[in-house]
Amino acid sequence: QVKSRGKDNYCFFDSSMNVDTSQRLTLERDLRRAISHGELEVHYQPQVCLRTGEVGGLEALVRWRHPQRGLLQPAEFLPLASETNLIAELSHQVLTSACEEVGQWIAAGYSDLRLAVNLSPVQVEHPMFARRLMAQLRQAGFPPGNLEIEITENVIMNDLEKVSQTLRELAQQGIRIAVDDFGTGYSSLNYLHQLPIHILKVDRSFIQSIRAGNEGACIVDAVIAMAKGLKLEIVAEGVENQDQLDYLRARHCDHVQGFLFGRAQPGPVVQKLLDGQLLPAAVQA
Ligand code: C2E
Ligand code: MG
Ligand code: MG
Ligand code: MG
């Protein structure tokens, strides 16, 4: 917003806007360089299957290894990437790296290992998205049946028509669809039986308020009951302690993800985890 002051009507930015704008421009320039120079990394957070006690899936989470500022989390650069067209290229790189890396583990014998990737609104709403994604998977030799895409309720509701078309095309190819941060978006529940949804990821705010008899726990119970009725799988997000795990196990939650089992880690670390199944004793029933 440009302010106009004084009798000569000079336009100028006030100093606070100036700082914001120049920081933004620096970040945008740096992010362009990050994308072209390979500074983005994909880290993976394990999703543990409560039936088997093993890592059944990995969620790909982007990180930026900034040459001066160290390892940056998505909150520090995804908003800007989404406002510019950089999100498309960023997402393409995440998917390429994750398919290559996890594809090798699948080929090496972890044939049921699932890769979960987050999608942003611009991707899902693009009419060519499903076809491009399939082409990308073919090129990488990645089996579509091992891929899950995660979208939020807000993305679904934003343009139900377009999103529904994309999701149908993906589901026809065997890709599974998860609703991320379930319970926190502005949405009706109608879409659950209109769209090809396979998985609900219960938002960590509900998991973190689990205490016997309180409201968070009631919501978790209700979501699990609804998911079972609709034959959807449940992933509990943000599981941090043994009490939460015990609660979820008692209610036959399918999968759990959270700091209790590990944070997102670089590929080589995750490969060791898979090979040794180095999970905390908490998980082994
Ligand atoms: P999300 O998809 O809901 O991912 C889960 C976030 O919760 C991750 O944060 C993860 O590190 C964090 N988390 C996992 N377990 C716990 C726990 O036990 N406690 C707490 N407090 N947090 C936990 P992260 O990596 O910072 O990612 C934030 C968000 O950024 C993601 O939320 C996702 O919406 C977005 N994102 C990350 N990577 C990508 C990407 O490659 N593409 C797109 N479009 N979005 C991404
Ligand atoms: Mg996610
Ligand atoms: Mg989430
Ligand atoms: Mg989230």
Image: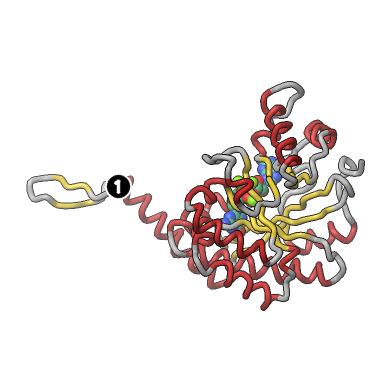
Which residue of the protein is positioned furthest toward the left in this rendering?
7
Q: Residue at x 69, y 58 (%)?
A: 176
Q: Residue at x 58, y 48 (%)?
A: 152
Q: Nearer the viewer, residue 99 or 230?
A: 230
**Taking 119 as reference, is 101 left or right?**
right
Q: Nearer the viewer, residue 34 or 182?
A: 182
Q: Residue at x 89, y 49 (%)?
A: 52
Q: Is mark 1 within 8 Å of ligand 1?
A: no
Q: Nearer the viewer, residue 107 or 65?
A: 107
- Tag 1: residue type? Ser
Q: Nearer the viewer, residue 121 or 163?
A: 163
The image quadrant where one finds the C terminus is top right
Task: Give the x, y percent position of residue 88.
Answer: 51, 65
Give the vertical position of 112 relative to 138 (above or below). above
Q: How is the image coloured?
A: secondary structure
Give the vertical position of 144 relative to 231 (above or below). below
Within-10-Å neighbours for mark 1: few <14, some 14–19, many 20+: few
Q: Residue at x 79, y 59 (%)?
A: 270
Which residue of the protein is positioned furthest toward the front in this rendering?
194
User: Mark 1 highlights which residue?
Assistant: 15
One can see residue 73 in this view: no
Task: Give the x, y percent position of residue 77.
Answer: 52, 55
Label 1 residue SS: helix
Task: Give the x, y percent position of residue 15.
Answer: 30, 47
